Image (cartoon, grey):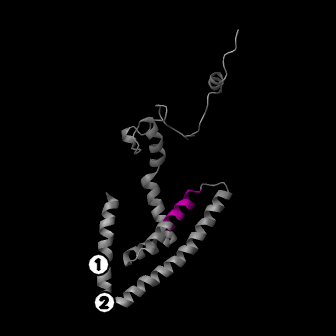
Amino acid sequence: MPLLLALIIVPIIEIGLFVKVGGLIGLWPTLAIVIVTALIGSSLLRSQGAAAIRELQASMGRGGDPGKALANGALILVSGILLLTPGFFTDAMGLALLAPPVRAAVIAWGVKRFKGAVHVGAMNARAGGDPAGDPRRGARVGPMGGPMGGDVIEGEWEDVERDETRRRPPKPD
């Protein structure tokens, strides 16, 4: 629902801003501003994106958690999409996301809002629990039906003895 509202409201805001700015300064200066902001934004995007890739590589090289670097990279990608979309509102949002303090605030909000939701929800979808990860609706049920706690390590296993008896015919007595 929020995405649907954004898809309706953002174009209306953009049209209103184009009409207002175009009425104040004229058509050609308005189009020039949109083109210049797109060029500046793409230049900033290129440099910020390269920095995000270096940060991710350094984090992985240290054996650390790449989560922050991945989140920064994702927000820079969103920023690039916004900057390439013509309009004043989307340009402002895209340029704001290129500022590291704004990205840090968005990441902090996202961590607080979604902490554990993806991890718990993915595990419970297999166990028949609540895929949304809502702890009030049984989200702490593990894949085997028991309580989930601590670190979860996923893996695959195979019963070797059972497989060997299936593959080999029984020995004659």
Mark 2 highlights which residue? 24
Image height check: is 17 above or below 3?
A: below
| Residue at 70 percent of width and 11 percent of height | 172
Mark 1 highlights which residue? 16
Give the x, y percent position of residue 144. Answer: 49, 31
| Residue at 46 percent of width and 79 percent of height | 38
| Residue at 38 percent of width and 78 percent of height | 88
Judge from the rendering whether residue 61 lies leftward or rightward of residue 77; answer left or right: right
Q: Which residues are magenta?
A: 66-76
Give the CA separation, mark 1 to mark 2.
12 Å
Image height check: is 4 above or below 47?
A: above
Label 1 crowd (10 A; few <14 / some 14-19 / many >=20): few
Residue 67 part of the magenta-drawn span: yes
Image height check: is 170 above or below 59?
A: above
Helix, strand or loop at label 2? It is helix
Give the x, y percent position of residue 138. Answer: 39, 37
Label 2 crowd (10 A; few <14 / some 14-19 / many >=20): few
Are dots 1 and 2 in contact, CB under 8 Å?
Answer: no
* Rendering quarter of residue 158: top right
Nearer-N-terminus badge (1/2): 1
- Magenta span: chief secondary structure: helix
Judge from the rendering whether residue 121 lies leftward or rightward of residue 73; answer left or right: left
Helix, strand or loop at label 1? It is helix
Instruction: Give amino acid for label 1.
Output: Gly
Residue positioned most to the top: 173
Residue 19 part of the magenta-drawn span: no
